[in-house]
Amino acid sequence: MQSTTANNNIDYKLVFYTAPKLFLLLKPNSPEYTILDANDAYLNATLTKRFEIMNKSLFDVFPDNPSDLKANGVSNLRRSLNKVIEKKTPDSMPTQKYDIQVNTESGIIFEERYWDVSNTPVLNEKNEILYIVHTAEDVTSTFKLENKLKTISNEIEEKSYLLKENEERINAILNALLKYTTMDFSDKLKITDKGDELDAIVVGLNSLIEELENQIQLLKLSNDELEYANNELDSFSYSISHDLRAPLRAINGYSQVLMEDYGHQLDEAGKNTINVIVKNAIKMAALIDDLLTFSRIGKQGLTKIALNMNNMVKTIVNELKNQAHANTLEFIINPLEEAQGDNSMLKQVITNLLSNAIKYSSKKEKSIIEIGSFKKNTMLIFYVKDNGAGFDMKYYNKLFGVFQRLHSDYEFEGTGVGLALVQRIIKKHQGEVWAEAEAEKGATFYFSLPIKN
């Protein structure tokens, strides 16, 4: 990458090398994708050195882990880069498992890593691709912690289910014991002489007690692990809140000072660069806020009350209309059933779903958003339908993951936490969240709540 120094004496090469985000500059020479340069953050994260990787093929430097038979990082990344060349637009990838090579005394080993990746073309005035900027974010710790929490929660749910299953056996044995204790002495002697029924009661009770003790012990271990994982998440959240906010404020502040004091010396490219820095700092602050909200919801207790969903939705719609282009929005609000739930949490759910519907239908000539509800068995189901961008259902498994996005920032801005937050809130209410969609034909999001007995 050539250093570009304009009359304002800004060293853009230095800015690139010291940028906090991970950047790799690629030559669009498919299938090699030669590495032209990398910033310091990228080198540190991938444990590589600049002179070792420059002018080499991307996939020679970063191959798949040969010991992982399911590794598909290379093929997925190549597909994304090819898509960028074909469409000349940015492409964001779902979280990828892409292990990195580590040199040890015993030789090269592969370290498990997970990444959020985007690839952006740099075009000249002839609409030709000069470079591809490969941006990555190491999300390994967040990804593993979330999976650990899911695993432990599933184990607890499974063990709780086993304990419930044993209720019938417990009741049967207790009934038999009760029957025995209320018998006349002569009848007890008959059973004692026969031995069969009494033995069955005693043997069954001993076996059940032993099994229950094992299950309770396993459940206690799982609860301990969950508490430990939650403490780790608390520590992680505090670290994010405390350690990252200060440098973000500094980045924002110094960028504003630079623009105010030296803006008259900058050309358009320089001003655009500063604006990008400010925009990304603001986005990072929003990510932090969303992550903390997501963490807090997991521990927050529920205060269930009867909720007039018609009034709630109308209030939220009016608020959102004031923030959007109301003249291009049409809301169809069908009569909504009354629900039982936490007022602030369900308001968050409705707000997130309607905000998404507005955002992803914003490129249509007219956004049409429909809200409704219906009963099905013991559940009350609400839905939010839009005529927007939709999505390909083959990526459905990524839909409700933290920081998972099915559209790039280039298409629609966002933090990737909103739907994960919706799912967490609804699960706390013993409900479910799901969606149906088709690319460019809109999406419908559903959530269910138990009907009050």
Image (tube, rainbow, N blue to C red):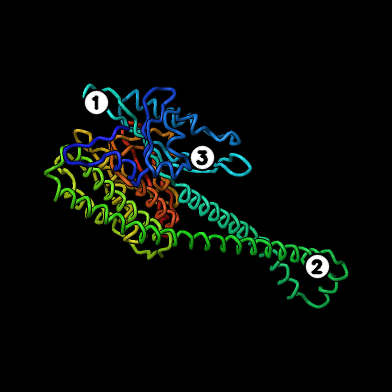
Q: Could you tell me if the residues under marks 1 and 2 are in contact, i.e. CB atoms within 8 Å?
A: no
Point out residue 373 in the picture as x, y percentages from the top left corner: 33, 47
Q: Residue at x 57, y 64 (%)?
A: 224
Q: Could you tell me if the residues under marks 1 and 3 are in contact, i.e. CB atoms within 8 Å?
A: no
* Above/below status of 110 relative to 203: above
Instruction: Determine whether the residue tagged by mark 2 lies in a helix, strand or loop.
Output: helix
Q: Which residue is mark 2?
A: 198
Q: What type is the residue that disc 1 sits on?
A: Asn
Q: Could you tell me if the residues under marks 2 and 3 are in contact, i.e. CB atoms within 8 Å?
A: no
- Check residue 100 in the rendering and tell me which mark sits there, or answer none: 3
Crowding near the residue tagged with mark 1, few <14, some 14–19, many ≥20 C-alpha atoms within 10 Å? few
* Above/below status of 146 relative to 103: below
Q: Which residue is mark 1?
A: 124
> In this orientation, which residue lies closer to the viewer: 382 or 345?
345
Q: Residue at x 83, y 76 (%)?
A: 186
In three-dimensional space, the C-alpha distance between marks 1 and 2, rounded to whole angstroms, equals 90 Å
* Above/below status of 378 relative to 78: below
In three-dimensional space, the C-alpha distance between marks 2 and 3, rounded to whole angstroms, equals 64 Å
Q: What type is the residue that disc 3 sits on?
A: Ile
Q: What type is the residue that disc 2 sits on?
A: Leu
Instruction: Give the residue at the far right of this rendering.
Output: 193
Of the numbered discs 1 and 3, the one sitting upstream in the chain is: 3
* Of marks 1 and 2, the one in the foreground: 1
- Check residue 159 in the rendering and tell me which mark sits there, or answer none: none
